[in-house]
Amino acid sequence: MKKKKILIIEDNEDIRDSSVEILQLAGYEVLEADNGKIGVELAQQHIPDMILCDIMMPELDGYGVLYLLSKNRETSNIPFIFLTAKAERADMRKGMDMGADDYLTKPFDDMELLNTIESRFQKKEKIEAFYSKSFESLQLLTNQNQGQGLDELKKIIADRKVKQVRKKQIIYYESDAITGIYLILSGRVKAVKLSEDGRELVTGMYGPDEYLGIQAMLSGDHYNETTEAVDDTTICLLPKDTVKQLLDTYTDIGQKFIKVLSSNLIEKEEQLLQLAYHSVRKRMAEILIRLAKQQNPSENSEAQIRISREDLASMAGMATETVSRTLSDFKDEGIIEKKGSVIDIIDFSKLHKMKN
């Protein structure tokens, strides 16, 4: 079995030597560099399976290393772990936003080092396994008789670096310049609009195999809503220039994106009608049905939804107290069961028959 290759970029000789020794004893092939510039050269030359990199270094710091490697197609998807001192914790947010996968706080012991590396390799394997499943769903983007476009899309996604987004972390803000389209691999993301008085309206809830930013991509230069992770979420960015080239080359993919966009617009129109004309009870019933269908399109006799009271209020355009009162009524009527943020729908027929 081929040994996994790890590159460690660290200017502290003691930390570097001890880390190299323990990794070699654990069966890894190890490359080492004492500054960022040499580290980038080694990464591009040897394409390691993982990179451990200090932040504060001569020649080129860790942020510069990550930036340069993320711009190279061959190195952009290599798992990247920052090594940082406790005093640098405030800077870690910057590193994670730039695309780092994890970080280790110095000083760390041998088991912390090995556990972090093994955990990251396991996550990478799970994501790769998920890709094979996701590619089946990508058939929706191309016609069966035009495999070339699908193959190209698969290749683009496979070459992109997967990003882990923590719960409540913003993916992009309304009015941010468009960087591309995001594919959700796991987890859930909500799209929100803010009113002038600061109130939040949830305009969409998205899950695995769904895309974010299509409307903005096709209609302008800036995102038209803010997106936030509802759970710990895995996403993949398809860069703006890449998507435009793909759309120009394969017209059937453009047609499918337009269909996705049209479907989203229809849902938002229905949401606006519900806000304008439906009663509180009818609005809540429609939202619960819509959320249940996202998780299980077949709509079985029962379904489970996990969502906060605040997000339900934002989707329904009502106060959180009204949400609580309405859900309590539904529970008393035998329509749902509720424990914390988990709602079990036990009678779909009553939701569908809810009077306005």
Image (spheres, grey):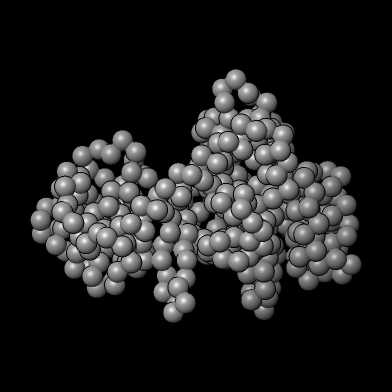
Task: Judge from the rendering whether residue 71 lies leftward or rightward of residue 303; answer left or right.
Answer: right
- Spot occupied by residue 351 in the image (x, y as percentages of width and height): 19, 49
Task: Judge from the rendering whether residue 294 lies leftward or rightward of residue 23; answer left or right.
Answer: left
Decide if residue 58 is in sight here.
Answer: yes
- Spot occupied by residue 209 in the image (x, y as percentages of width and height): 50, 42
Q: Is residue 197 above or below residue 317?
A: below
Q: Quadrant of residue 307?
A: bottom left
Q: Quadrant of residue 294?
A: top left
Q: Quadrant of the C terminus?
A: bottom left
Q: Residue at x 86, y 50 (%)?
A: 42
- Spot occupied by residue 159 in the image (x, y as percentages of width and height): 70, 41
Question: Residue pushed farthest top?
Answer: 145
Q: Residue at x 63, y 61 (%)?
A: 222
Question: Residue pushed farthest left?
Answer: 333
Task: Judge from the rendering whether residue 152 lies leftward or rightward of residue 174; answer left or right.
Answer: right
Total numbered badges shown on the rendered structure: 0
Q: Is residue 157 above or below residue 87?
A: above
Q: Quadrant of the N terminus?
A: top right
Q: Residue at x 64, y 76 (%)?
A: 90
Q: Is residue 160 above or below residue 150?
A: below
Q: Is residue 253 above or below residue 16?
A: above
- Spot occupied by residue 44 in the image (x, y as percentages of width and height): 84, 47
Viewer-proximal residue among 32 and 356:
356
Q: Residue at x 47, y 56 (%)?
A: 189
Decide if residue 113 is in sight here.
Answer: no
